[in-house]
Image: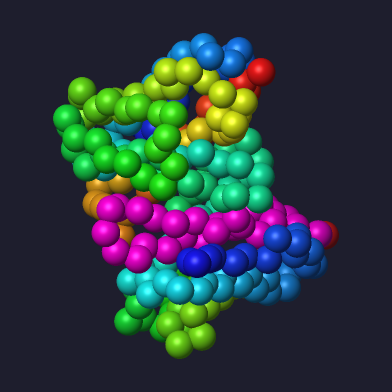
Amino acid sequence: NAGVTQTPKFRVLKTGQSMTLLCAQDMNHEYMYWYRQDPGMGLRLIHYSVGEGTTAKGEVPDGYNVSRLKKQNFLLGLESAAPSQTSVYFCASSYEGAATGELFFGEGSRLTVL
Amino acid sequence: SQKIEQNSEALNIQEGKTATLTCNYTNYSPAYLQWYRQDPGRGPVFLLLIRENEKEKRKERLKVTFDTTLKQSLFHITASQPADSATYLCALFTGGGNKLTFGTGTQLKVEL
């Protein structure tokens, strides 16, 4: 099994450009999450989804949009990138909710906004 | 404000010793606490989950304790090996919103 796959792994953007990060999981998980990880800040939840067609805001949702059109895919979009969005982005999925569900993480997408 | 504290300084220990990592939290009443391992350039990997009504959980060389009075979890690795070198993250679920809140992690280095 591939588990959780993120694309692209690296990307450099200029301020104001847009892009989409793709997360795909092959474990038939209901729950999917997007986190960002910054030095000294830990992982912070951006948006999450409890099933196909649903999305919800996490701790730091501003400047990001998400879509879950198919159960296996969770897309994270940046409409107008800003330098503050330079970070490593992790997608995760779980069979159960975050309380008792083991989160399976992807390998990360490193984004630099110039 | 709500806070999760893990020692930001790296913990260096000798091979074969027991490593003990600490996760302290304030202004939370977590129902569940999880520990993850993260290697450089990789995503976190789940290790253990402990519930608020459990005092201790074990898995092979790993042991986690959860003291809701002290608001602290301890993570132990016995007979540590260089392969155990990584950053270890604790994460709390406090109820609602499917939000798992992570600490910043503690880097463990096991030396020969």
Would residue B81 be seen by someone viewing this image from the given angle?
Answer: no
Q: Residue at x 49, y 56 (%)?
A: B102
Number of disc labels:
0
- Between B90 and B71, the one lying in front of the other is B71
The image quadrant where one finds the C terminus of chain A is top right
The percent position of residue B9, horizontal first and vertical second, equals 75, 62
The percent position of residue B69, horizontal first and vertical second, equals 45, 87
The percent position of residue B109, horizontal first and vertical second, equals 75, 58
Would residue B91 be seen by someone viewing this image from the given angle?
Answer: yes
Q: Is residue A1 left or right of residue B112?
A: left
Residue B72 among magenta residues: no
When asked about the image quadrant of residue A93, the answer is top left
The image quadrant where one finds the N terminus of chain A is top left
The percent position of residue B110, horizontal first and vertical second, equals 75, 60
- Write down the region rendered in magenta: B82-111
| Residue at the extreme bottom of the image, as rendered | B69
- Between A32 and B112, the one lying in front of the other is A32
Q: What colour scheme governs how the chains and residues are painted in the rendered image of this protein?
A: rainbow
- Between A48 and B22, the one lying in front of the other is A48
